[in-house]
Amino acid sequence: MRSWPEVTIPVVPGSGPGLRLHDSASDQVRPITAQGTATLYVCGITPYDATHLGHAATYLTFDMVQRVLRDQGLDVRYVQNVTDVDDPLIERAQRDGIRWQDLAERETDLFRFDMEALRISPPDEYLGAVETMDLVVTAVERLLDSGQAYRLEDGTGDVYFDVATDDRFGYVSRYDAQTMLELSAERGGDPDRAGKRNRLDPLLWKGKRDGDPSWPSSLGAGRPGWHIECAAIALEHLGEQIDIQGGGEDLRFPHHECSAAHAEAITGLVPFAGHYTHAGMIGYDGEKMSKSLGNLVKVSGLTRDGVEPMVIRLALLRGHYRDYREWTDDYLDASERTLSLWREAVRRPIAPAAEATIATMRACLANDLDTDGAVEAVTRWANQRPAHNDSGLAVQAMEDAVDALLGIKL
Ligand code: 5CA
Ligand code: ZN
């Protein structure tokens, strides 16, 4: 699938501390230990109602991860999927009386456009489920061959993963059994489906149903389950073990738990990811902003109303990425003022030295992405009065640092 245009990132002289990032599996902020190239898989959208500020905040989080890693001198290999065939997409297309393919294409286009406007770096590989069907089929075949998957004996052709074959199951999300069952029911699983060996067993391949899209395969006609799609794409395009698996907090279970379990069952290597990193939810009207609830503020809605994308980006950098953050328009007003202050500061003929501020920005960001700390550091610099012996060099240095490290074009 087509990705979106590359974002140019200036090189900032010097370097900062190595990135330490939260990992859900250990519930610790731990260093990223990659050498040379860091591998990053971030779960992509299900394209039926893009792009709301929750999506934007999550992809921005992983854009910040990449900026810090790059600033550290690492290369980043980044893969993202598009869940371009799945129940919620098909249901929405039916509701709206359009083809699911057209809905997916339209919303993916909008997503690319919004990502570019927000200056979020594109993945090196951007892959849809439809175009990676073969990878999923091969992965499911391997799990059937090794006895870690089974076919339901009710003639549907459905194939499930047997969680009992994985004695580490649950290590990514660390939820108790009852919570896993509840979240599975809430988030696309089917704990009450008759004939499964274990209620938590996730679907790997859904046999063809009347009126449902399906693809012929050695497994029988059908379509992929959700978690195996991400496991199969990551294994093919990033390798058997990756540095970071990313997404929003609502993907901790069952999605990332199950895709890690699938990948580990296929490779025999544990852990699938060195870090499982999750962004907190953006809320609106007191609840998680979501397509299904409809309490959305869309990036395209704000830009249509004349809000500058850099104001949205800066607003989403406020607070901490792991916290639940309730969206209010006040964030926009405050960010507009901050952005004006910064822009005035870099239009000055001379400005206070930038080194200490850049060092603070780097230290904050390396500490589990303390974006608020980095933003405050820039604001303090912008409020400093230049002394008579200051020069104009600091102005360009800060403009570049704000661009490279925060992704904000002044
Ligand atoms: N296609 C799957 C992943 S393979 C999916 O979850 N798609 S999604 O469109 O529902 O969500 C895309 C990303 O946005 C996920 O990482 C999800 O956790 C994140 N996300 C969704 N809603 C919010 C929200 N309100 N706040 C923060 N992140 C959110
Ligand atoms: Zn995913």
Image: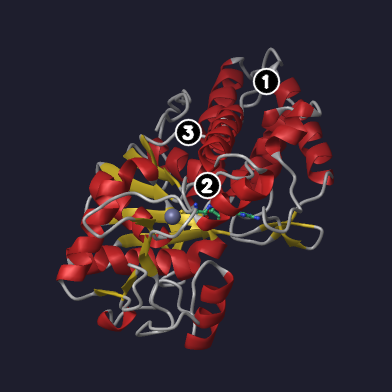
Circle 3 sits in a helix, a strand or a loop, which is it?
A: loop
Instruction: Kindly tell me whether residue 384 is visible in this rendering.
Output: no
x and y percent of residue 29 in the render? 46, 64
Name which residue lies at 67% across and 55% down.
290
Above or below, 263 against 407 in this view is: below
Name which residue lies at 22% across and 50% down.
239
Q: Do residues under tags 1 and 3 come within 8 Å of each other at their CB atoms?
A: no
The residue singled out by tag 2 in the image is 45
Q: Label 1: how many residues lie within 10 Å, few (<14), some (14-19) or many (20+)?
A: some
x and y percent of residue 177 in the render? 47, 86
Above or below, 392 against 326 in this view is: above
Name which residue lies at 44% across and 60% down.
209
User: At label 3, which amino acid type do we have?
Assistant: Ser
Residue 372: mark in rendering? none
The residue singled out by tag 1 in the image is 346
Q: Report the side of 69 relative to 239 (left or right).
A: right
Image quadrant containing the C terminus: top right
x and y percent of residue 69 in the render? 39, 42
Ligand 1 closer than 8 Å to the CB at disc 2? Answer: yes
User: At label 2, which amino acid type do we have?
Assistant: Ile
Q: Earlier in the sequence, mark 2 or mark 1?
A: 2
